[in-house]
Image (tube, grey):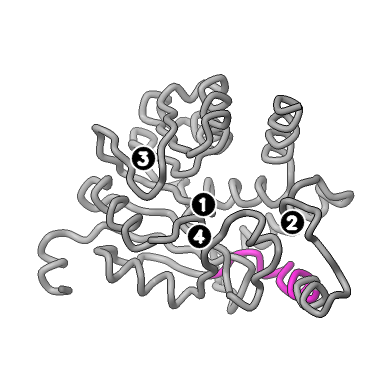
Amino acid sequence: MRLNFENKYHKIEKNHFWFRARRSYIIQLLSKESRDSNVLDIGCSSGILLEELKNIGFKQDNLYGIDISESAINKSVKNGIKHSYVMDAINIHLDKKFDMLIASDSLEHILNDTEALKNWHQLLNPSGRLYIFVPAFMFLWSSHDVNNMHYNRYTQKELKAKLIKNGYEIEKSGYWNFFLFIPILCIRLKERIGLFSNQNSQSDIDKIPIFNNVLFKIMNIENRLLKYLNFPFGVSTFCIAKKKTKQLLKNHP
């Protein structure tokens, strides 16, 4: 039964429009990064993003992933990501520095997010970058967050402030999943007043929807638009944050 569940989740993670569109946008953001970069995916699950980075030219020996789930890491290793480790994201110990950290829907699972951001800062090479995505807006809090053991949802302003306070310089920030914001907000409001229940579901994305490919195309249109504009709100918020140099840190105590 456990194996069947893991195979089902891997299929969802690989094919669900939300995961596919998120990976597509991250790859879009990384398109100008050197293919020689050392990359750490924090909360890598079964390593699908790292596998896709390898397929576009990033060197396999430079791709690393950590996840708290042993079964996910076993799957990641089987998928060819040999530098995959079972590790808690709040306190990562690796004998390596990285040019890029990717934390896609990881920080919200950590009670002490400040300690996590400090730890991640230490893992970066000078001028290394953190690519981070988190769920947005506490008014969207729902059973999805409870079931997935989230501690917080963030505004763009809150995420930027936390990063700056912990030694990062913001290069880009914004909201993601703008197009589906209103439908998801309506579902949240219906759940809140008892007209809709998601209590029996582990997550909003525990099955592949009927219009999966259509939704993926919609999200990919948004991904392309994000090259030219920022949306005022979305279901997620993100930042690209650069590690400050020592001189910058002196100027920003």
Q: Nearer the viewer, mark 1 or mark 4?
A: 4
Q: Where are the magenta residues, as a range?
A: 175-186
User: Marks 3 and 1, how far apart in space?
Assistant: 20 Å
| Label 4 sits on residue | 108
Q: Amino acid at mark 2?
A: Asp
Q: Quadrant of the C terminus?
A: bottom left
Residue 204 tag number: 2
Q: Amino acid at mark 4?
A: Glu
Residue at screen point 73% across, 32% down: 5
Which badge, 4 or 2, is on the more N-terminal residue? 4
| Label 1 sits on residue | 104
User: Marks 2 and 1, how far apart in space?
Assistant: 16 Å
Q: Residue 142 at x, y = what percent?
A: 69, 68
Asked if 149 appears above or below 188 in the picture, the reply is above
Residue at screen point 31% across, 58% down: 115
Residue at screen point 24% across, 49% down: 122
User: Marks 4 and 2, how far apart in space?
Assistant: 16 Å
Q: Amino acid at mark 1?
A: Ser
Q: Amino acid at mark 3?
A: Ser
Asked if 52 appears above or below 177 in the picture, the reply is above
Q: Nearer the viewer, mark 2 or mark 1?
A: 2
| Label 3 sits on residue | 34
